[in-house]
Amino acid sequence: MMLRHFGLATTLATTLALATPAHAVTELQWWHAMTGANNDVVNKLAADFNASQSDYKVMPSFKGGYADTMNAGIAAFRAGNAPHIMQVFEVGTATMMSATGAIKPVYQLMKDAGEPFDPKAYLPTITGYYSTSKGDMLSFPFNSSSTVMWINKDELKKAGIAEIPKTWPEVFAAAKKLKASGHETCGFSNAWASWVHIEQFSAWHNVAIGTKANGLDGFDTVLKFNSPLHVKHLQNLIDLQKDKTYDYAGRANAGEARFGSGECAIFLTSSGYYGTAKGTAKFDFTSAPMPYYPDAAGAPQNSIIGGASLWVMGGKKPEEYKGVAKFFAFLSDTNRQAKLHQESGYLPITKAAYEKTKADGFYQKNPILETPLKELTNKEPTENSRGLRFGNMVQMRDVWAEEIEAALAGKKTAQEALDAAVSRGNAMLRTFEKTAK
Amino acid sequence: MTNALRQSLFLSLIWVCMEKSAVFNRSKLLPYALLAPQLIITFVFFYWPASQAVLQSFKREDAFGLVSEFVGLENYQALFAQPEYYKAMLTTLIFSTLVAALSLSIALLFATQADKNLKAAPVYKTFMIWPYAVAPAVAGVLWFFIFHPSLGTLARPLRGLGLDWNPLLNGNHAMTLVVMSAVWKQIAYNFLFFLAGLQSIPKSVIEAGAIDGAGPMRRFWTIIFPLLSPTTFFLLVVNIVYVFFDTFGIIDAVTGGGPAGATTTMVYKVYADGRLGGDLGGSAAQSVVLMVIVIALTAVQFKYVERKVQY
C-alpha cells in the first residue's frame, strides 16, 4: 500500500510539473565534439546567441570524440530523442545524407523558416563538401581545415636548406639533409595517413579517388586511387621509410607531438594544428602548401577540407526549426565569422568574412592562417577536387591506413597495397549502397 | 562450502537448489519468487541482448535503422569470404593464448611469493592489486605513451640498445605491446584469487610433505599446485572470457587494431565494423560467431579440463 501511495504521489507531482506552462523560451539541443579551446568557442557562441534574443536557447553539450558524438546522435535518434543540432565530421557526411527522414536539409530549413539565405555567399570549396550535386546545402559547415605542411624554420636553417620545399622531390631532398644534420629518426612525417596521402594527395594532383566525382554524384562510385601516380608516391615513401628519411607516425594525430618536440622538422597535418603548435613549439615555425609532383599535369590543383559540419535532425517542431535557422543566420554574420576565424584558426565559411580578414591586413601578420585558404582556392575545383563522399568512410579510412602500414612495413609492394585498399574499399561501398537506397 | 561457492559462480542458483533438494511446502510461488531476481537479470542482460544479436545478424540495416531488410545468411557469407576475418581469428588465438598463459603464470608466481612470511606483505599485496582498478582504456593510454616510438620514456632506451622499436609499423612489436598491457591489467585479478586459494591450503599438509623430505619445488608441484586446481580452473575460464571480450578497450587505446590489422582480434573487429563502420548486420554476425566459440570453449573446459580438477 505504501508503495502504491508513493507511486501516486510521484505521478501527481510529475503531472503538476508538466502542467505548469512551458517556458516561453524554446530550447535547442546542440551536441558537439569540441574539446579544449574549441569547446570554449562553442559555449561562447551559444551564450552570445542566447543573449542576442529571448525566444530561443541553444544548449551545447559535449558528447565525446567525433565518432562518439555521431554514434550518440544515431542512438538517440533510434530511441526517438535526437538533438536538434548535431556536429558530424566530414567523413560521416555520406551516412548522414543517406538518412532521409532522419535529417532536415539546411537549405530546406532556411526556406521553411523564411531566413535570408544565399548559398553563394559561402566558400564553394567548403560548402561543396556538404551539398548535393545540384548545389543544395545539406548541412551547415562549422569547423573546417585543410592539410598543410608544417615547417620548423630553425632546423631547416641549421641543415642548410635555404628555401621551404615546394615539390615532393624537394621535400625528399630536404629530409635527407635534415637526417644528415642530426634528425636521424625522422626526416619528415605526417598525421592522418589516409587523409594526407590518399584523399588530399589525389585532389591536389587532380587525380580521382573514385568515380562519380569522388562519390559526390552518386553512391554507385568505384575507387580508383591505385593509379601510377599514387603507386609512385607510396613507393617513394616505402623507400624512404627504410632509413627513416620518412617515418610513419600513426593513423590519427598523436604523431603531431613529433613536430612540436622538434623531432620531425617537416610534418604534414591539419591546419587546425595551429593552436597546439602555438602552445607547444619552442622554435620558429610556419606552414606551407602541400608539396606536389612537378611532372603531374595540372598539379597543384586545390585541396579539400576536413573538419565538421552541423546537421539538423528530422522530426522536430516548426517552431524549433525556426530557432535553428536563426542560429545559423547568426553564425553566418560576417563580423562574427571573421572573428571566429582569426581567433580559433577555423576557416571562414563565407566569402565576405574571408575578404574582410584580408582587407584588415590580418594575413600579413599571420600568413600561417592563410595557407589552407590559398590551397583551397588555388584553382577552380574539378570533378577530382570538389570533395569526396563515400559511405562507411570512417572505417574505410582505417582500412586504407592498414594497407599503407603493410606497405611501409615491407609486407606488400606499393601496387599490392593500393590494389588491396581499393578492392576492400569497393566491397564496403557496395555494402553501403545496398543499405542507402 | 567453498566448493558450492565456487560452483555457484558458474552455475545458476537453480542448480544449487536442486542439489540441496529443498522442499517448499507452504507456497508454490515462493521458489519462483526467490529465483526471479536471478532469472530476470540473466534474461535482461544475457538472453535478450544475445537474441537481439542473432536477429540482427540476419538483417541488413543502415545506421539510423530507417531501412531494414531480412537477408538470411548473407552477412555470414560475406564474413567468411573476408581473408581479414581469418586473420583476426589467428590473431585472437595468438593473443589469447599469450595473455592467458602469461597472466596466469606470472600471477601464480607473485602469489606464491606473497604467501610467504614477508615483513611488508600487506604493502606488497596492495600494490599488486592496484592495476585492477585502472580502467582498460586508461591502462592502454599509459602503455601507449610509455612505449610510443618517439615520445615514450621506455622506447628511447630500447632504441638506444639498438632495437628498432616501432609498434606503429612493426606488427610483432604492436602485439607485444598489447599483450603486455592486457597481462599487466589481468595479473592483479589472478593474483587475488591465487593468493586466496593458497591461503586456504592447510599448512599441515605442506608441513607433512616437508617432514617427509620434499623440497620446495616438489612440495609446490605435488601438493600445492594440485590443491590449487579449482582456483586455477576457475581463473582459466574467466581469463579466456577476459581475453576474448574485455580486451578491446586496451587494444583500441594502444594500437587501434593496427598496424595493418596485426592486433585486430575478433572482438575488436566487432567493434570496428559495428561502431566505426556502422555495419550492424555484419558486426552482429561476428558477435554470434564469437559467442558460439566462447560457449564451445567453456563447454570443452568443463567437460575435459574439469576432470583433472581436484575439489
Image: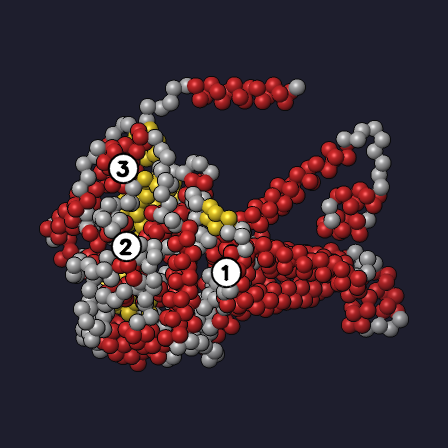
In the foreground, B23 or A230: A230
Question: Which residue is denoted by mark 2 in the rendering?
Answer: A217
Of label 3 and label 2, which has the lower sequence position?
Answer: 3
Residue in the image at 58% along x and 50% along y: B54
Residue A388, percent from left and from top: 29, 57
Residue in the image at 40% along x and 60% along y: A396
Instruction: Give the chain of mark 2.
Output: A
Q: Residue furthest left?
A: A359
Judge left or right: residue B32 versus residue A429.
right
Residue in the image at 84% along x and 72% along y: B214
Question: Which residue is denoted by mark 1 in the rendering?
Answer: B78
Judge left or right: residue A241 versus residue A216.
right
Residue in the image at 14% along x and 47% along y: A352
Determine the secondary structure under disc 2: loop
Which residue type carries mark 2?
A: Asp
The image quadrant of residue B289 is bottom right
As displayed, is residue A5 above or below residue B25?
Answer: above
Q: Could you give the CA–CA distance between mark 2 and mark 1, rounded to whole angstroms? A: 27 Å
Count residues near mark 1 (Cα–Cα under 10 Å), then give few for <14, some for 14-19, many for 20+.
some
As displayed, is residue A294 above or below residue B271?
Answer: below
Which residue type carries mark 3?
A: Leu
Determine the secondary structure under disc 3: helix
In the foreground, A345 or A280: A345
Question: Which residue is denoted by mark 3 in the rendering?
Answer: A109
Q: Could you give the CA–CA distance between mark 1 and mark 3, rounded to whole angstroms? A: 40 Å
Residue B113, percent from left and from top: 71, 65
Pointers 2 and 1 in contact (C-beta within 8 Å): no
Determine the secondary structure under disc 1: helix
Residue B305's tag is none
